[in-house]
Amino acid sequence: MNRQQTIERKLQQALSPMHLEVLSETHMHNVPEDAESHYRVTVVSEQFSGKSLLQRHRLVNAALAEELASGIHALALHTMTPEEWSERNGHTRNSPPCLGGGAK
C-alpha cells in the first residue's frame, strides 16, 4: 500500500467523509520521484460541523500523525462541511506553485 492509499484509508476511518480526495503533488516539486512527500487533501465531513479551521486541521493531523512524522513534507488541506462543499459547488483552490526545496 503506498502512502496515498494509507492517507485515504486513515481519513476514511477517522472522519467518515462524504467526499475525500487525496492527490499526490510530489511530481510538482523538486524532490526525488519516489518521495511521496507532497499531498493535497480535500475532506468533506459532518464531523467538521461547528469546528474552526484549526480544529478541523487538528483532526486530520491526528489521523495522519504517523505519516506526518515520517516523510510528508507538505499537506495542503481543504476541510469542509457538506454545506460548505455544496456552497462551493464541489470546488477547491489549486495549491500554490512550488518555490523550491530539496534537490533531486
Image (spheres, helix red, strand yellow):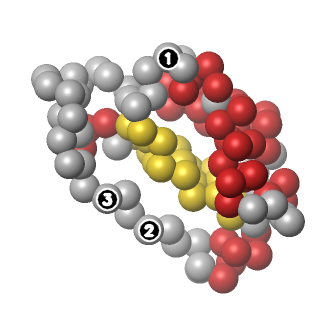
The one of 18 and 60 positioned closer to us in this rendering: 60
Which residue does the image show at 34% across and 43% down from the upper left? 25
Spatial separation of the CA atoms under disc 1 and disc 2? 27 Å
Question: Marks 3 and 2: CB-CB under 8 Å?
Answer: no
Q: Amino acid at mark 1?
A: Ser
**Considering only order in the chain, which callout, 2 or 1, is on the residue closer to the N terminus?**
1
Is residue 48 shown above or below 89?
Answer: above
Query: Please, is residue 50 above or below residue 67 in the view?
Result: below
Q: How many marks?
A: 3
Labels 1 and 3 touching (C-beta < 8 A): no
User: Please, what secondary structure does the residue beneath circle 3 have?
Assistant: loop
- Residue 85 versus residue 63 in the image, above or below: below
Q: Secondary structure at mark 2?
A: loop
Q: Earlier in the sequence, mark 1 or mark 3?
A: 1
What residue is drawn where x is 86% and y is 66%?
A: 50
Residue tagged 3: 96
Q: Quadrant of residue 94?
A: bottom left
Identify the residue shown where x is 76% and y is 68%.
82
User: At numbered mark 1, what does the secondary structure look like: helix, strand or loop?
Assistant: loop
Q: Which of the 4 image quadrants contains residue 103?
A: top left
Residue under circle 1?
Answer: 70
Q: Residue at horizontal 64%, vertical 26%?
A: 65
User: Where in the figure is residue 52, as x and y percent of width and height?
Assistant: 75, 62
**Label 2 is placed on what type of residue?**
Arg
- Residue 19: tell me if it is visible: no
The disc placed on residue 93 is 2
Marks 1, 2: nearer the viewer: 1
| Residue toward you, 75 or 11 | 75
